[in-house]
Image (cartoon, grey):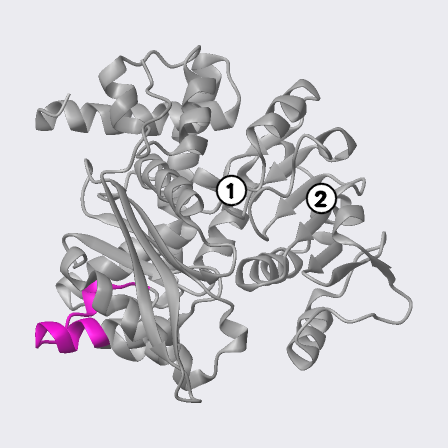
Amino acid sequence: MLIKHDKNICEICNTRLENLLKDIKLSDSELMMLNRPKRVLTFNIPLRMDSGEIRYFNGYRIQYNDALGPTKGGIRFHLDVDLEEVKTLSFLMALKCAVSDLPFGGAKGGIEVNPKKLSQSELERLSRGYIREIHNFIGPHVDIPAPDINTNSQIMAWMMDEYSKIKGRFVPGVITGKPIELGGSKGRVVATALGGAFILRRLPEIEKLNPKKIKIVIQGFGNVGSNIARILFDWGYKIIAVSDVKGGVYNEKGLDIKKIIQKQKEKGFIPEIEGIKKITNKELLELDCDVLIPAATSHQITKDNASAIKTKIILEMANAPTTPEADSILFKRDIKIIPDTIANSGGVIVSYFEWVQNSSNEYWSEKKVFKKLEAKITRAFDRVASTCYSEKCDLRLAANMVAIRKIIQAEKLRGNL
């Protein structure tokens, strides 16, 4: 029996699990283990601004489950970061690592801040301050952070350096997504996007078709969105619309993605382009296409717009872009969803490769990283697809089944269930 007033419960995770109960049989103790994180860290980070003023920022790190190994998950800097969001994302990371057959549990972290309003020196001090608050609870065999929204390899470098200074030795394996010079892995920057592209190309509905006959729409043009756009464009696919936070562009005949990426670098956003229609993000999501790729933020496809979605396939490159209510509507409309837990797992897979390289102090070529990524992510997808077929269910439920069963079995073997 779920205890609704228990403050430790992740409400969104609880809702997701309740929706699964008719398909996945779980005992009360299994539910209690799954619907709440193992460890929750919340704290204030004091930051001396360049003006000399001291300001405080809310920080979070949640280690949801470590049955399969040390926890793993990104750190995001965003004004919308709050405790419930970080709980949910750490839960999804636990599922993602389990689905991908990685020796990791799930974690997530973040700071409630708009990093664009900080100077470079303020950003560095805030990043180092975050590590000072959590250094006793992370480590190469405990919890391994990584980049997420609005964080990058430079921020990871500062964080790794701060941890190493505290410990009195160089510890590259504490964080992944680092610069190559500090133990980062080749291929990490494009790993999430490339993993999603590998899966898309493997879909039966896609693999036998001429790429130029497939209409692709991409919402979000940050690291993941722009990279998957470039990769698919290089492979010959027709991308008819892309967008960022300020809106997007649309051309039924296909866009020149390399030109748009260049213009975005120059302007900082996707500008209006002569001869190409300007559209809003709402209009983009409702375009008639074969593949819709949400690669922005969470909860973009909801019960309010799910009925207006006109695509055959949704490849979830963002974390939790589709709400559970929208899921039900899309399933009834026979729209195939490749869930985030498998679609965007390329990033954590290559993070695992980085961790392995740090542990062995032997570093791989980009070609080797990409070859191992394709092998690992396609094996994971094939396992989910096989479960989908045998259980006669959709891919999200199949992915959840694979992950939850694996976590529960590990907890049982440990004696915790």
Q: Earlier in the sequence, mark 2 or mark 1?
A: 1
Mark 2, Cα crowd under 10 Å, few <14 / some 14-19 / many 20+, is few
Q: Quadrant of residue 11?
A: top left
- Closest to the observer, 29 or 409: 29
Q: Amino acid at mark 2?
A: Asn
Residue range in magenta is 162-176
* Residue 187 placement, left or right of 142: right
Residue 380: percent from left, percent from top: 38, 36
| Residue at left offset 66%, top offset 76% | 268
Q: Is residue 406 above or below residue 264?
A: above
Mark 1, Cα crowd under 10 Å, few <14 / some 14-19 / many 20+, is many
User: What residue is disc 1 on?
Assistant: 199
Q: Is residue 29 above or below residue 102?
A: above
| Residue at left offset 34%, top offset 11% | 25
Q: Quadrant of residue 181?
A: bottom left
Residue 228: percent from left, percent from top: 58, 56
Tell me the CA gap for discs 2 and 1.
16 Å
Q: Amino acid at mark 1?
A: Ile
65 in magenta = no
Whether residue 258 is visible here, answered yes or no, is: yes
